[in-house]
Each structure stands twice: as C-alpha cells, then as structure tokens.
Image (cartoon, rainbow, N blue to C red):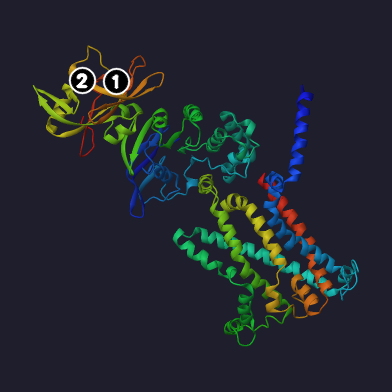
Amino acid sequence: MTALRQEPLAEEWARQRVRRRTSVLARLRSKPVAAFLMCLPLLVLIVGLIIYPFFYSIYLAMLNKRETQVVWLDNFRFLLTMDTFWLVVRTSFLFTFTAVFFKALLGFILALVINTLPTRGQRVWRGVSLVPWVMPLALSTLGWWWIFEPTHSALNWILVELGFAPKSWLADPFWARFSIILVNVWYGTPFFMIMYLAGLKSIPLELFDSASIDGAGPFQRLRFITLPMLKNIIAITMLFSTIVTFANFDIVRVLTRGGPRNETHLFGTFSFRLGIESGDVPLGAAVALVMFPILAVSAFFILRGVRRSVV
Amino acid sequence: MAQVVLKDLNKKFDEVYAVKDVNLHIRDKEFMVLVGPSGCGKSTTLRMVAGLEEITSGEVHIGERLVNDLPPKDRDIAMVFQNYALYPHMTVYDNMAFGLKMRKFPKPEIETRVREAATLLGIQELLKRKPRQLSGGQRQRVAVGRAIVRHPQVFLFDEPLSNLDAKLRVQMRVELKRLHDRLETTVIYVTHDQVEAMTLGDRVVVMKDGLVQQVGEPMELYSKPRNKFVAGFIGSPAMNFIETTISDASGALYAETAGLRVRVPAERTSRLAPYKGQAVTLGIRPEDLQEATGGDPQDLVFEALVEVVEPLGSEILLDTKVGTQTIVARVDPTVSTKHHQKIRLAFVPDRIHFFDNKTEQAIA
C-alpha cells in the first residue's frame, strides 16, 4: 500500500524540481526562498555593521604598528607587560562598578519617590529628571568641565564660601576619578529611574494591600514585595548600564583626557589615545578588543540569572 | 470573633461621595454580603474596614475597638482579593506563611497552621508550587488559605469569585459557605452578583451610589424590596416594571395600562387610594406570572403576545409584549406556546408590588 503510493509521489516531486529549476519566478514562490529574501536587509545590516567590523578589528589587532605584517598575538602580549594598561584595567573596573552601583541606588530611590507622588505631579518630575539622560553627553560634560574649573567656577566658590579649601578637581588623581564617576552617575541615573519606575508601575497594587494586611511595614514591603518583583528589571538594567559604562568615552575625553598621568583612562579613551593620537592603530584595536570577553562573560551570567528567575 | 459596626461612614473622592452615611451592624459570626452595581461604594466600604482606604468621616469598630486610626495590620482582619493578590515570587507555602512570619510566629507554629489550612482546603499537594503553576480555582484556595492561617477576627472578601468560570464559581460558593460554618468567623463579602449575595449571605446589604438601599435576609429582600432599585436588582430574570395608572370602579382600585387592567388586592387599597388618578409603577416578578387557567379571576388575567421563547428545561422564559411594554414571564415547562402566538397570563395577586414614581419607594 505505502509502496504503491510512494512511487507516483516521488515522480511528481522530481517533475516539480525540474520545473522550478527552469523558472526564477517559481523559485521566488517557494517559502524558504521568500523568507530568506525578506530577512536579507537585516542580514546585510548585521553583517555590515557588526560581523565585518568585529572581525576586521580582530585582524587589525594582529598587525604590526605600520600595518604591514601580521604579528598574531604580539600586541596583546605587549599590553600585558604595560603598567599603564593595568592601570586602565583597574580604573575601568573601579569606574564601572562604582558608577553602576550609585546609578542603581539613586535611580531606585528616585523612582520610589516619584512613584509616591500624585499622578498629576508625576509627569513633570519624570520629565525633569530625564533631562541629564536626554542631553548630548559631550555637551553636558562640557558644562561639568566648567563647573569643575578650579579658579573661576561654581564648585570651588561654594566650597570656599562654606569654609573649605578649594580643590583642583580634575588635576588631583582621586578627585579626577571622583569627578568622572560623578558625571557618569548624574548622566545615567535617569535611565535607571525610568526603568525602575516602569517596573514599579507593573506591580499590582493589591500585592501591597495584601502585604500591609499581612502585617508588613513599609520597609518589609520594600524588602519582600518590591525588590523581588523588580529583580529582573534590576538585573537587566544593570547589565545594560555595565556595558555602556564600561565602554564610556565622552566623559573622560572631555573632562580629563585620561589625565592626570593616565589615572582616569578607560578602555575606550586609552584605545583612542594609542590608536588615533599615537598612531598605533593595531595596539588601540587590541585594547578595545580586551573589553569584549569581559562584557560577553558578564552578559552571559546576568542573562542566565534572568532566565532562571523567569521560569 | 467579633462584630463590626460602621457608624455614619463617609468616603469622598474629590467632592464626590463614594460612600455616604453608611450605618451597619454586622453581628459576630455573621456572613454579611455587600452587593450592588459597580461604583456603588461596596468595595470602598470594605477597604475602609480593612484600613486600605482613608475614612473621610464616621467610625469603624471591630470588636470593641474603634479602628479608624489603626493600620491594616493591627485590625486583626484578613482579606481575599478579586485577583487573589498572591505573591508571584513565593511558593504557596510562603504565601500562606507570610502573614505569620511578619508577625514573628515561631517556625513550628507557622508550619502547623499552614498545613492545617492546606488540609482544610485540599491544597496540601501544592505547597511547593509557585502561583503561576496553579489553576484559577487553586489560586483562589491559596488566597483563602492565606487568610485563614492567621485566625483573624473578621474575613473580608472582595469579589473573590469573579475571576473564576461559571461552574467553578458555583462550586467555590458552596465551599466558602461550608468554610464559614466551620470557622465561625465574621465575614464581610463584596460582590456584584446578586445570586452570590443571596446564596451566601446571612444578611445582604444592597448599595447604590454610595448609599445603603436595604439591609435584610435574602428572602426578605426578594419578597419585600423596599424600593424599585432593590426590586430590580435582586432576582433573575429581573422584576417586570409596568407603568400603570390607578383608577377606581365599583369600589375597587385598578392599575391600568394599554392592554392590561389589574385589580389591586383588597388589603392594598388603603395605601394606594391616595394615588387615585396618578401613575405608579407596578412590579411583578417573572415567576409570579403564570399561564391563566379558567379558574383565575378575570381582573388578574391579561393577554400577551409572545415574542421570544427561552426553554431552560426546568422552566420556560417568555418575552412577551403587552401594549408597548415588554413583560417577561417564567412559566412551567409544560406550557406549549410559540413566538408570535398569544398567551393569557395571570398575576399571583399577593406578589404584586407597587412603587411610587417620584420616590421609587415601595408602596406597601
């Protein structure tokens, strides 16, 4: 029975195959081909903007300074022996973790405060607090640079008025680091705020009602309801922010250019210094590439945690 | 175990009264149902008892205490919400234990109480699951379980069955009633479903526009509605309201409208006499209309045109037209009629209601 049925079918398929080969139009009609064509613009974008530059930078990082010869991993080996490189690694981690921590903390507090405001006032405050995030970063950093300016500017004037000694904000290694972190926190907090606020709004109000009847005070509601309910959004927001903060360029470039004595260089600015300003493009590419595995690994762990808690 | 007393309770939202001058005395161990259409203030009243809504004016007493200024957690109440409000990130066990943990009960005590409640509700198998792994009915039970582990003085239910499908709702209704018999706790139960109200309540409060319309035992509300709203709200299908004029002829009063003339029962004439020549609303429940037999007095019988026939098995609903008015009758399944046919219907005389057209109050 099955054998009888199979034979004419196989013949039919063969005939169809011949027909299709002859006609382009017929080929377009086949579903897999059409699907591929519809995805093509996206594929071109991904290949052109992500895959090609990624592999090109790997290739670049394996050339010698004059880009005439492939030296394989020599650039990376050289970096590992470089004290400045290790300084950049330390600064980058310090910068990222401190900045992300304070952005998350302040963003959370801000979101909680704004969420308790009556609905009418909320829109205004939400709008106002988004301003730092909406402004072009290089521009607003320029404003900060003016605030930090030691002799003629606001910050030191206030300090002096209050009876403190003026500080050379961008020239002292500690205060220079403090300054770039401060500006980054100022810039990034609204993003956390808006994400947390969206998260807070999605928690059903009955949960809080129920918890207060169950005997939970404001602090316990925060601890047992709000935080667990926001766990995912906190993780995702911190991941995104970690990646963006780690790769930050504008703030350091405008405020300190990595100084004093390379103390405030991050991967991005150090790569720019080596590759563009000192003309060693392969070495600069190598610095930038070191960031990749660090970010990829952190992305993997955080996303895995998110997926687990979602199930 | 405690009584709950509401005294001149008011709630104002932006100049609009959501609850107005509510006075209720809910007795110890009583199952009290607040029922009414949405926006009638029943949930707001409940939330004021719970302490989730600020009281504009008036007093709430639970037991012997005035609780106006006590936070929800100190009122010794438990509440079940419409969408259950289970904590999604906690297991069933933790959900039920949460209130006890917050109150710093010792662990073994918590364990005993949770297991006890779980056994009572038949959810022992589910204790390790998360709420999202449960069906609607199971979630409902967990929500009830979370309320009963605390052994509160008063249970508050805010439309707890609305999210269940019809069949499960009937089943849970019976279970809630059984549970109340067993726990012997005061219950305040809010619903918009008059069937739920009638079947569950020891007494029922009908509310509309923030005002209490009537308080009474279910059958009292059904047979002696105080006004037109209660009459129309309680009972399904709803009571027929017929616009009539009162006239008198040969010593008796009649309620008349096109195609219909009913003699006012003798014992009601004195109350209706002042309305002579005026319009009043006649109310009659569908089940108080029957197919006329030869024995029915002619002044209680009228002819109606059948427009829709709805056979329900145990009875038949007839949508009929008399003059310009639509009248629904609920007749025996043995009645044989078709649409576009005429049928003669008879009033059950002592079940006729009259309502003043201006005040909408019953004329009794």
> Can you give x and y, in whole percent of width and height, for residue A8 in the image?
76, 29
Q: Looking at the picture, which amino acid does disc 1 mark?
A: Gln
At mark 1, the secondary structure is: loop
Residue B108 figure quarter: top right
Camera sees residue B2: no
Rendering coords of residue B114 (x, y %)? 60, 35
Q: Is residue A279 found left or right of B330 in the rendered image? A: right
Mark 2 element type: helix
| Residue that carries the numbered disc 1 in the rendered image | B341
Can residue A120 be seen in the rendering of this structure? yes
Q: Do tags 2 and 1 sit on the same chain?
A: yes
How far is disc 2 from disc 1 in space, using C-alphas?
20 Å
Q: Chain of mark 2?
A: B
Label disc, if present, on residue B304 of the rendered structure: none
Residue nearer the viewer, A33 or B216 = A33
Q: Is residue A208 left or right of residue B295?
A: right
> Mark 1 — on which chain does it sit?
B
User: In the figure, is residue B13 to the left or right of A66?
Assistant: left
Do the numbered discs 2 and 1 sit on residues whose CB atoms are within 8 Å? no
Q: Nearer the viewer, residue B45 or B181?
A: B45
Vertical arrangement, residue A108 with respect to residue A147, above or below: above
Mark 2: few/some/many CA within 10 Å (<14, 14-19, 20+): some
Q: Is residue B324 above or below residue A218?
A: above
The number of numbered discs placed on residues in the rendered structure image is 2
Q: Residue at x 41, y 51 (%)?
A: B54
Q: Which residue is mark 2?
A: B300
Q: Amino acid at mark 2?
A: Leu
Mark found first going from the N terminus, 2 or 1 = 2
The N terminus of chain B - image quarter: top left
Q: Position of residue A293 (x, y in %)?
A: 79, 60
Residue at (43, 36) in percent of width and height: B189
Which residue is at a point 37% across and 19% down the rendered structure image? B315
